[in-house]
Amino acid sequence: MYLKLLWGGIQIDPTDVFVNNLGHWIRRVYHEITIRTNEVLRPHGLARSQWEVLYRIASSDGVTQKDLQTAMKVESGTLTGIVDSLVKKGWLFRQEHPRDRRIKLLRMTEQGHQKWLGIPNPIDVLRPHMMKGITPEEESFVVKLLQKAVSNLDSLDEKEEDK
């Protein structure tokens, strides 16, 4: 016989493989952050992925789509759709690169920049709620643990290149 836990109105078997699986909880945190971030941004007509693109462009003097794709670790088609929607909404424009006309720089429009200044940073809004009851030491430990996990997974790419 097992004890049933009540989690979000659902009874969970604590022997279930997901309950004690680190990857499951990482995914759950990511999912919750995405949902809550979208809630913060919805009144401004943005989604999390669009906000991330704007965030990376706002503090620059233009970013190539390729550099943005590398930084965000997303597929080209995915990023193209996000950028196209932001261009259509008037947030961004594409400009020829000064040294290579084949390359386009993504820049914020003046209107986009003005709107950007009025949008709350969802990280600043959500972080206090997410970190409630978590000590700085616990946070530091989890960050180091996750950095190691990412490094271990990134090393798989290096092993593939050596083949």
Image (cartoon, rainbow, N blue to C red):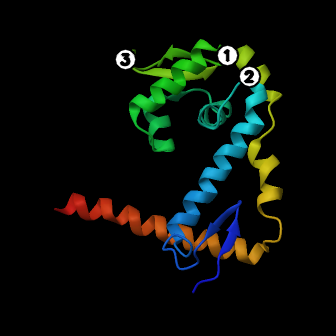
Q: Say whether residue 35 is left or right of residue 116.
A: left
Q: Which callout, 2 or 3, points to the residue nearer the camera?
A: 2
Name the residue at the bottom extreme. Answer: 1
Q: Residues within 10 Å of mark 3 (few under 14, many from 20)?
A: few
Name the residue at 77% across, 73% down: 136
The amino acid on which the numbered mark 2 sits, given as a three-letter code, is His
In the image, residue 1 sits, relative to residue 127, either above or below, namely: below
Q: Say whether residue 92 is left or right of residue 65.
A: right
Is residue 154 visible from the viewing direction of this image? yes
Nearer to me, 115 or 100? 115
Residue 113, position as x, y percentages in the image? 74, 22
Nearer to me, 99 or 37? 37
Q: Residues within 10 Å of mark 1 (few under 14, many from 20)?
A: some
Task: Write down the residue under mark 2.
Answer: 113
The image quadrant that residue 151 belongs to is bottom left
Residue 88, position as x, y percentages in the image? 59, 13
Residue 126, position as x, y percentages in the image? 78, 50
Task: Write down the residue under mark 3.
Answer: 102
Q: Which element carries disc 3, helix, strand or loop?
A: loop
Q: Which element carries disc 2, helix, strand or loop?
A: helix
**Marks 2 & 1, CB-CB < 8 Å contact:** yes
Task: Write down the residue under mark 1.
Answer: 109
**Marks 3 & 1, CB-CB < 8 Å contact:** no
